[in-house]
Amino acid sequence: MKRILPFLVILLLWSCDGPSVNKEDLHRLNGYWEISEVEFPDGSIKEYGMNTSIDFIQLKENKGYRKKMKPQFDGTYDTSKDVESFEVSNINETCTLRYKNEFSEWEEKLVQLDSVSFSVINQEGVTYKYKRFEPIKIPQ
């Protein structure tokens, strides 16, 4: 057992090394997303059930925007006029979303991304987890 433990520790550290998000997968950010949970630096978690607003993200050639949308029962969306523009940069093999508007600047590190979910961590250490939005279909 003593011989196996160091090998397992080295294997664990080696598997954690490297980028968690490939630049080739960034196109998966495009679409409608809803927040599923928020994890705070103290370890506490806030889970979200149903959301009244969702995010629409559009990204092309490392530049994009995020916009708040409110899904309607008829399948349409009400949209706000507020748009958060961002750029994707690759710093130390980490994809970072850099936001800038007339009031402030901030960044979020993209820590996980696949076709149905993604998560980011902000500068305060808060992790936001998103899942792909699926509209509720009401039979007519």
Image (cartoon, helix red, strand yellow):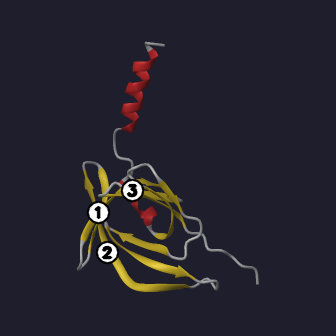
Residue type, mark 2 in image: Ser
Circle 3 is placed at which residue position?
24
Of 115 and 61, nearer the camera is: 115
* Residue 115 appearing in the image: no
Of 37 and 110, nearer the camera is: 37
Q: Is residue 71 left or right of residue 93?
A: right
Tell me the crowding category of disc 3: few under 14, some 14 to 19, or many 20 or more residues within 10 angstroms, Cα based.
few
Question: What is the spatial separation of the Cα atoms under label 1 and label 2, in whole angstroms?
Answer: 11 Å
Residue 105 placement (x, y as % from top left):
24, 70
Q: Decide: marks 1, 2 in contact (CB < 8 A)? A: no
Residue 45 placement (x, y as % from top left):
49, 54
Q: Decide: marks 1, 3 in contact (CB < 8 A)? A: no
Residue 108 placement (x, y as % from top left):
33, 60
Residue type, mark 1 in image: Glu
Question: What is the spatial separation of the Cα atoms under label 1 and label 3, in whole angstroms?
Answer: 20 Å
Which residue occupies the extreme right position in the image?
140
Residue type, mark 3 in image: Glu
Q: Which mark is residue 107?
A: 1
Residue at the location (61% across, 74% down)? Answer: 135
Residue 72 placement (x, y as % from top left):
59, 84
* Residue 38 appearing in the image: yes
SS at mark 1? strand
Question: What is the spatial separation of the Cα atoms under label 2 and label 3, in whole angstroms?
Answer: 20 Å
Q: Earlier in the sequence, mark 1 or mark 2?
A: 2
Marks 2, 3: nearer the viewer: 2
Tell me the crowding category of disc 2: few under 14, some 14 to 19, or many 20 or more residues within 10 angstroms, Cα based.
some
Circle 2 is placed at which residue position?
85
